[in-house]
Amino acid sequence: MSQYSNISTCREKGILEIVLDRPKANAIDAATSHALGEIFINFRDDPTLGVAIITGAGERFFSAGWDLKSAAEGEAPDADFGPGGFAGLTELFDLNKPVIAAVNGFAAGGGFELALACDLIVTVDHAQFFLSEAQLGIIPDSGGVFRLPRRLPVAIATEMLLTGRRMDAHEAARWGLVNRVCSPVELMDQARQLAHQLLHSAPLSVAAIKEIIRATEQLSIEESYQLQRSGELPVYQKMLRSQDAIEGPLAFSEKRTPVWQGK
């Protein structure tokens, strides 16, 4: 268990599980965002952890996003949500470890933006994803307006952004927005199974892949090759010269499981 109110954490065998528990809708105010940021930064910096899973308590809401009760009490949309941005993750750009969103219900507004900031999404079959900010006089500026058009066809993303229309789990799967759809009782088992698969990969390889995806997202293939070969991607360079880059082929040739050192 963690020391954070309304957030519990559990760590086991390289996996950190984070549960947001703020009844009734797991909404996130500035204080909760700061706490999540501290958790994600500690995860980033802990060499014994390789994968994080974030989920919500209950079966109705993954997260309703920004706490509108706090907003009504004066918390501004551009409040200080901490060094990782809203929900501690949406602007944590130097996190080179994978995060899985285990979406247990509605992912609305900033809750959807939190899921979009994760690398992989496992969702229950009754989940719905939507961004209703335009109907509230604001916009989804914690990454939704940037990330959604890069994850969906632009016309579909624009419709969701402008109208707040809801996308169910099965449609999200058809568009490739989520990785797995399952029943509520299977959710955490599916997320943990995926996390264990990620732990089989070399940690520096995972980090280098995340670095390259992030750095080349807006580049052409030719420009991406140029950047990759420029020596300007430090994690990729570290991976190329690592002991793990020797260990992987050696273990394959010796027909054994590789032992990753992360160096």
Image (cartoon, rainbow, N blue to C red):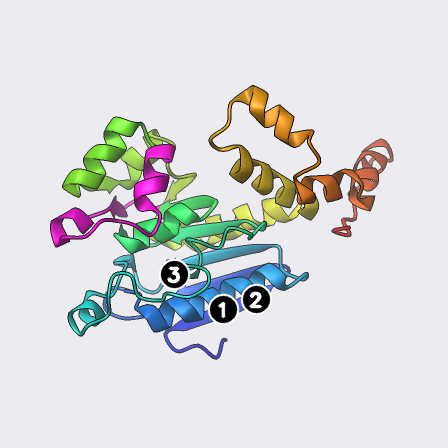
Q: Amino acid at mark 2?
A: Asn
Q: Residue at x 57, y 42 (%)?
A: 210
Q: Amino acid at mark 3?
A: Ala
The residue tagged 1 is 38
Q: Is residue 76 above or below residue 52?
A: below
Q: Is residue 201 something one can see in this rendering? A: no
Q: Which residues are magenta?
A: 124-151
Query: Which mark is drawn over residue 42?
Result: 2
At which x and y percent is residue 258? 78, 43
Judge the density around disc 1: few (<14), some (14-19), many (≥20) Cα neighbours within 10 Å: some
* Mark-to-mark CA distance, 3 and 1: 10 Å
The residue tagged 3 is 87
Label 2, secondary structure: give it. helix
Given residues 104 and 203, the one toward you in this image is 203
Q: Amino acid at mark 1?
A: Glu
Q: Is residue 42 above or below residue 3?
A: above
Judge the density around disc 2: few (<14), some (14-19), many (≥20) Cα neighbours within 10 Å: few
Q: Is residue 249 something one can see in this rendering? A: yes
Given residues 166 and 104, the one toward you in this image is 166
Q: Is residue 226 rendered to the left or right of residue 85?
A: right
Q: Earlier in the sequence, mark 3 or mark 1?
A: 1
At which x and y percent is residue 31? 36, 73
* Mark-to-mark CA distance, 2 and 1: 6 Å
The answer to whether mark 2 and mark 1 are in CB contact below 8 A is yes
At which x and y percent is residue 81? 37, 65
